[in-house]
Amino acid sequence: MIAVRVPDRPGMLAGVLATVAAEGANVLEVHHNRAFLQGAIGDTEIDLTLETRGAGHIETLTAALKGKGYAVVRREHFGMPGAPDLFKRWKRVRSLLVEGALDILF
């Protein structure tokens, strides 16, 4: 997942997505963060969950976005290198549930 900070103006999302498409990445999910963004008023942060060909492709894509003047932050996400191991996290949640230290309401 990457986050791209842009001015909140018409066409900015289209520009970001055009760069993503030109680099051959597939967009799986898009989320705009306007309400709780820290920083300049009038900016928005676009979280992109992407399907890529690996770490090198992500670096190329990030460089292309930065080359267009976008501020880019790479976020940790399950399935990405360096991300927390999902199985370890599940084991921890399960142990907290068994101990009664965590409640999940449905």
Image (cartoon, rainbow, N blue to C red):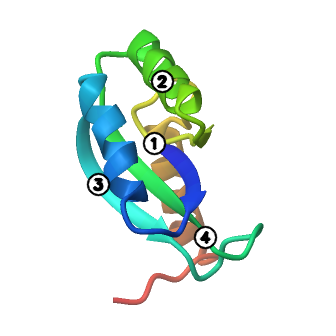
Q: CA distance from mark 2 to mark 4?
A: 48 Å
Which mark's residue is nearer the viewer, 4 or 3? 3
Q: In the rendered image, which residue does mark 1 sit on?
A: 1
Q: In the rendered image, which residue does mark 3 sit on?
A: 29
In what element is the residue under mark 4?
Answer: helix
Image quadrant where one finds the C terminus: bottom left
- The residue lying at 48 percent from left, 24 percent from top is 64
Q: Amino acid at mark 3?
A: Glu
- The residue lying at 38 percent from left, 56 percent from top is 13
**Residue 64 marker:** 2
Q: Amino acid at mark 4?
A: Glu
Q: CA distance from mark 2 to mark 3?
A: 20 Å
57 or 42, nearer to the observer: 42
Q: How many labels, in total?
A: 4
Compared with 8, 27 (above or below) is: above
In what element is the residue under mark 2?
Answer: helix
At which x and y percent is residue 56? Answer: 44, 10
Disc on the earlier residue, 2 or 3: 3
In this orientation, does residue 101 appear? Answer: yes
Which mark's residue is nearer the viewer, 4 or 1? 1
Compared with 23, 103 (above or below) is: below
In this orientation, does residue 74 appear? Answer: no
Q: Is residue 24 left or right of residue 77?
A: left
Q: Are marks 1 and 2 in contact (CB under 8 Å)?
A: no
Quarter of the figure with residue 87 = top left
In what element is the residue under mark 3?
Answer: strand
Q: CA distance from mark 4 to mark 3?
A: 35 Å
Disc on the earlier residue, 2 or 4: 2
Q: Amino acid at mark 1?
A: Met
Q: In the rendered image, which residue does mark 4 sit on?
A: 99
